[in-house]
Image (cartoon, rainbow, N blue to C red):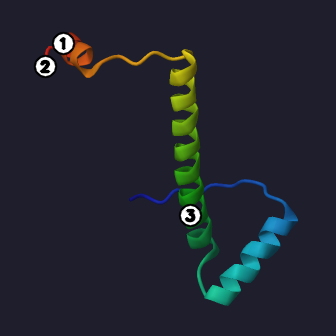
Amino acid sequence: MQKIRSTFTVSDFIIDELNEVSEELHEKKSHIVENALAMYFDYLDAKIADKRIDDIKSGKEKVIPAEEVFKELGL
């Protein structure tokens, strides 16, 4: 996997916490941030899935049966 350098701004509290954790665990800050974001994205995936389920239940979204999708794709 390719690594890309990025710049962003966070609060001083977050930076202080990151520095402390990095020192305590002897891990690079970039490694900690990458792992934290990966875990947070997993959480967001679950939150989005719950929202989609709620949208289906409330009728805001419609489910298309797999058979229709396969037929349309010629499978």
Q: Badge 2 is on which residue?
A: 75
Residue at image coords 18%, 12%: 71
* Crowd band around label 1 with a 10 angstrom C-alpha radius: few (<14), some (14–19), many (20+): few
* Lower sequence index among marks 3 and 1: 3
* Crowd band around label 2 with a 10 angstrom C-alpha radius: few (<14), some (14–19), many (20+): few
Q: Mark 1: which amino acid?
A: Lys
State the residue lying farthest toward the front. 57
Q: Mark 2: which amino acid?
A: Leu
State the residue lying farthest toward the left. 75
Q: Badge 3 is on which residue?
A: 34
- Can you give x and y, in whole percent of width and height, for residue 52 in the image? 53, 30
Residue at image coords 73%, 73%: 18
Q: Badge 1 is on which residue?
A: 71
SS at circle 1: helix
Q: Mark 3: which amino acid?
A: Glu
Instruction: Look at the numbered discs 2 and 1 and tell me whether their residues touch, using CB distance below 8 Å.
Output: yes
Location of residue 6 with respect to 73 vertically, above or below: below
Distance CA(mark 3)–CA(mark 1)? 41 Å
- Can you give x and y, in whole percent of width and height, for residue 57 in the image? 53, 23
Q: Where is residue 70, by image quadrant?
A: top left
* Crowd band around label 3 with a 10 angstrom C-alpha radius: few (<14), some (14–19), many (20+): few
Distance CA(mark 2)–CA(mark 1)? 6 Å
Location of residue 2 with respect to 69 vertically, above or below: below
SS at circle 3: helix
Distance CA(mark 2)–CA(mark 3)? 39 Å
Along the viewing direction, whichever of 34 and 9 lies nearer the viewer: 34
Does 67 sit left or right of 9 as displayed?
Answer: left
